[in-house]
Image (cartoon, grey):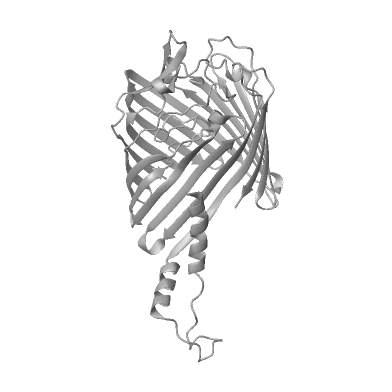
Amino acid sequence: MLAACWLLPAGLLAQEAPAPLRADSLGTPETEPAARPEQSAAAGRTRRLQSEWSGQIALEGAWFYDAAYFPDQRDSYASLVAQPKYILTAAQAGLKLTVRPFVRLDAVDASRTHADVRELYASWSHHAWEVNAGVQSVAWGNMLGPSLVNILNQTDEREDFTKFERLGQPLLDVAHVGETSSLRLYVAPGFRPKAFPGVRSRLFYFPLPIATDQQTIEHENRPALAARYTQRAGNFDLALSHFYGTNRAPVMHFDRQRFLLVPVYRTIHQTGLETQWIRGNLTTKAEFTYRADGKNYLSYNAGLEYLFANLSGHNLDVLLAAEYLRDPWKKDNQYPFADMFFTAARLTLGGLHTSELAIHLLTNRASWTPLLNVEAKRHFAEHWQATLGWTSYVGPALVATDALSVIQYNSAVQLGLRRYW
């Protein structure tokens, strides 16, 4: 697939070479032969096609300086990550093809080596109508931290769980999009269970091994159905959604005989409400979900953001954010950060070479159990970026029965070098 993605733009560029000029063109002798009909047709076709090629490739590494929770866990990892993206557009026909694969090769942690198709779908649009079919990555909600309503795509557990990465999901969606409102209907014909890193991985955050070979899916072959309506009124945005299908997060059953966890995926109904109000540099957001899964759960997430733009006229932007999430379903099923605060500070210094500093803090409300992530980025030489990060549990020691007991052992320093195109 990657080879085809490399060759396709080259083939299109070769097709876009200008056809021979006609005799009546400026600067061309009258003896120049006119273009053949098939050449003119090919030139017309290529003018209707536009291709765009982008993406990044990165070297990433991390060093874990705490003693490991599980035996035989490594103290470091090194990975090569590729995320190319290709878009082919036929504007006159309202057609577009999007291809975005993802590949990670880890030299130390084999359980993190994986490939995924994040996006591979075709789009058709005509006036207010739009149809998308294929593997898509759909994001609902506007939260900077964890989102309650963002349920269509499965999370990629083999990536850093604090980054909220999502796997591609086969979808068919039909939408009517107006100037201030939209309605989308989704059908997801397949379900993707979670693929966890191995128990020897330092990014494995459960206190017991997980028997994915014993997992059960309540209605494995039943497609998921979803709908989402959005409305904008001035500075106020509202979205109402409903999802019926397999819950992307499993219930972990404890197997006492083998002393491990067995994932069980259940079919749920979930209704979501999103609101966002922007006034000047202040943004107010909220999410609510009502979930039927054995019993009914009402969850909510609310937050504020304030942007200090171009401070002192030096291209310095500072974004401050605070969010609070309460999810009784997660609490009942022993997931970490079910009743939590998320706070963030992001500093961006623009100019020729952009520099960024992001500080994120996740902490439980009832017990002060903070997880801190700090990441600095520096762009240089136009297409390059260097990153330096630090992730650490900075609270008091936790007992083994706490949902965060493993995370407190995984403090790490991360390094990265990326090449964009």
Write the residue at 54% across / 34% down. Answer: 113
Where does residue 330 sit, x and y in percent of width and height?
44, 20
Where does residue 273 sit, x and y in percent of width and height?
38, 32
Q: Is residue 336 above or below residue 379?
A: above
Where does residue 185 sit, x and y in percent of width and height?
31, 42
Write the residue at 28% across / 32% down. Answer: 222
Write the residue at 39% across / 22% down. Answer: 215
Viewer-proximal residue among 101 and 24: 101
Q: Quadrant of residue 322?
A: top right
Looking at the image, can residue 36 be seen?
Answer: yes
Left or right: 237 with respect to 207? left
Where does residue 198 sit, x and y in percent of width and height?
53, 24
Write the residue at 50% across / 82% down. Answer: 21
Q: Is residue 328 above or below residue 80?
A: above
Viewer-proximal residue among 328 and 65: 65
Looking at the image, can residue 322 be seen?
Answer: no
Callout count: 0
